[in-house]
Amino acid sequence: MTNDTNPKKYDLEERTAKFGEAIIEFCKKVPRSPITDPLITQLVKCGTSVCANYCEADDAESKSDFRHKIGIVKKESREAKHFIRMIVKAVPELKEKAKPLWTEAKELNLIFNTIYKKVK
């Protein structure tokens, strides 16, 4: 038996929760200003809702309910990519810290896009 503390990449609930946590930690590092405040708010909302909406999809009451909720997850992960990009535009010195988050948002968006397309 191994004592592996790293979540498996295919555990989407854990992966999306870790993404939300990383978004929160990243947003704590963004200097506050009239430009960044709304971007921070939007990124926290969409970045943390990826997991919340995935959990709702996991508990869906029907196939169409599942598809609808996965569609929301897909949109939220795409929105996170957008707001990460906007924060980097506003605070260029955060570019390197933002890269892994943007990549994860992109990967999650691709995963949920694939799931969405497969459920008809």
Image: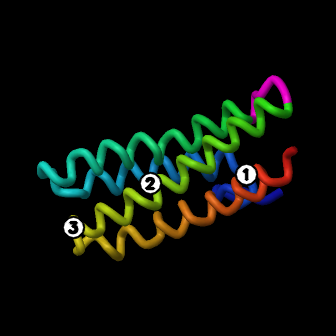
Which amino acid type corresponds to the residue marked 1 in the rendered image? Asp
**Left or right relative to 14: residue 90:** left
Q: Quadrant of residue 4?
A: bottom right
- Count residues near mark 3 (Cα–Cα under 10 Å), then give few for <14, some for 14-19, many for 20+: some
Residue labelled with disc 1: 11
Mark 1 and mark 2: span between their CA atoms?
16 Å
Closer to viewer: mark 1 or mark 3: 3
Residue 52: where, in percent of width, then height?
A: 58, 35
> Helix, strand, or loop for circle 2?
helix
Circle 3 is placed at which residue position?
A: 91
Q: Residues within 10 Å of mark 2 (few under 14, many from 20)?
A: some
Label 2 sits on residue = 22
Query: How much space separates mark 1 and mark 3, taking CA atoms?
Result: 32 Å
Which image quarter: residue 104?
Answer: bottom right
Specify which label sits upstream in the sequence, 2 or 3. Answer: 2
> In what element is the residue under mark 1?
loop
Label 3 near label 2: C-beta < 8 Å?
no
